Amino acid sequence: MSQHLDLAYTDFVKDEESLYRSVWRKDYCFFMSDEGNLCLSGEAFADKKRKPSVSRKHLCENPPYSKLPRLSDNDAVVLLTAEIIRKNANPITHKSGKNPQINHIIDVIPDIELPNHISHAVIFATPDFPTDGAFGKLKNSLAILANEWAIRPDDEFIEEIKQRHI
Amino acid sequence: MFIQQTPATKNQTVVLNIPSKTNTPENDSLRSILEAQSSGNFYRLSRTEVIIPKQSDITSPLSYTFDQLDKLYDLEENWNGYEVASPNPDAIEHARSWIGKLYLETQEKKLRWIKPHVTANEEGNAVFEWAKNKRRIVIYVSPKNVDFLKIWGPNILDEMIDGEAMNGISRLSIWEWLLEL
């Protein structure tokens, strides 16, 4: 029974759960809007397997400064909830070239296969994204939805990209 | 960065749909380079070769963007910590050509220019991004194709449209949409 409960605990990401995404290489993942507002790039969610990793807040040891969610000491960290992802990113309807249109259902699931940390989860599509076009939509949706900071980029960095924008 | 260029063939006619009314010295230089690049009349040498002409001398509105594209060459595999590919050199050069054409087309139409954010995706494609008011444009440039994503909110079903952006008409249409609000 206890094993069953433990499995249930780690096997489903509840709607209300807070999820962190660590943003490394900030110069490639943040930019300024025309009005001078800091924007998160969709490429902050770029992922080889088209399954962006997130860390479940309540399973991190000392969030948001612990590793995980932070991949390195200089990272910014943004916050999302599972509910907002499920609500806004579903479904992704995409047609690539002459291929038939596909509806992708988006969800978040734990992914704790070793060597992953117990807090590790992934945002994924069913069926898998066949091309990066549909995944681009998901990345950009996540970038807009991640509008809460856990660790904001430092002022010096923000000033630097403001200057670049001019 | 454009690289020292050596003619590969002679007497080849190059016809490009590049605006003719943007006859500033900067745009003329940019236009001639884009023509040469598109016609395949030049060998591309390694990026460590002598650079002629220097970007900042010929295309000041684009020099920062070209510098950012050059920096993509320095990104290695896994550059963002999530196992992504390193940017593809052919995608970077295609992106340079594409953004140069877009710039010239906007100048022809006397449209305002906004510097893009330059980055790369997990496939190694070059990516341009702009955000203005609640609108965003994302351009994905692969070695062969250019795709756009127009975004006006996070909802994928109702607030995003994608398509191809290979020709001048589609480029300008996307740009005008960004500037509309």
Image (cartoon, coloured by chain):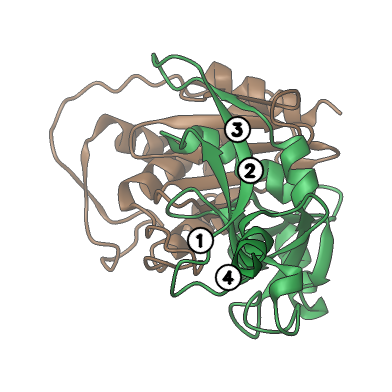
Chain colours: A green, B brown
Q: Which mark is residue A25?
A: 4
Where residue B50 sits: x, y (%)? 29, 66
Chain of the residue on which disc 2 is drawn: A
Q: Which mark is residue A105?
A: 3
Compared with A98, B119 (above or below) is below
Query: Which marked residue is nearer to the observer: mark 1 or mark 2?
Result: 2
Tag 1: residue type? Asp
Compared with B144, A27 (above or below) is below
Residue located at (50% from left, 30% from top): B147
Horizontal side of residue A101 vs A19, given as left or right = left
Tag 2: residue type? Asp
Residue located at (60% from left, 67% from top): A3
Could you tell me if the residues under marks 2 and 3 are in contact, i.e. CB atoms within 8 Å? yes
Q: Secondary structure at mark 2?
A: strand
Horizontal side of residue A162 vs B26, given as left or right = right
Tag 4: residue type? Arg
Are the numbered discs 4 and 2 placed on the same chain, yes or no?
Answer: yes
Compared with A6, A84 (above or below) is above
Depth check, front residue: B72 or B8: B72
Query: Which marked residue is nearer to the observer: mark 4 or mark 2?
Result: 2
Q: Which residue is mark 2?
A: A107
Chain of the residue on which disc 1 is drawn: B
Depth check, front residue: A160 or A90: A90
Task: Identify the mark nearer the N-term, 4 or 2.
Answer: 4
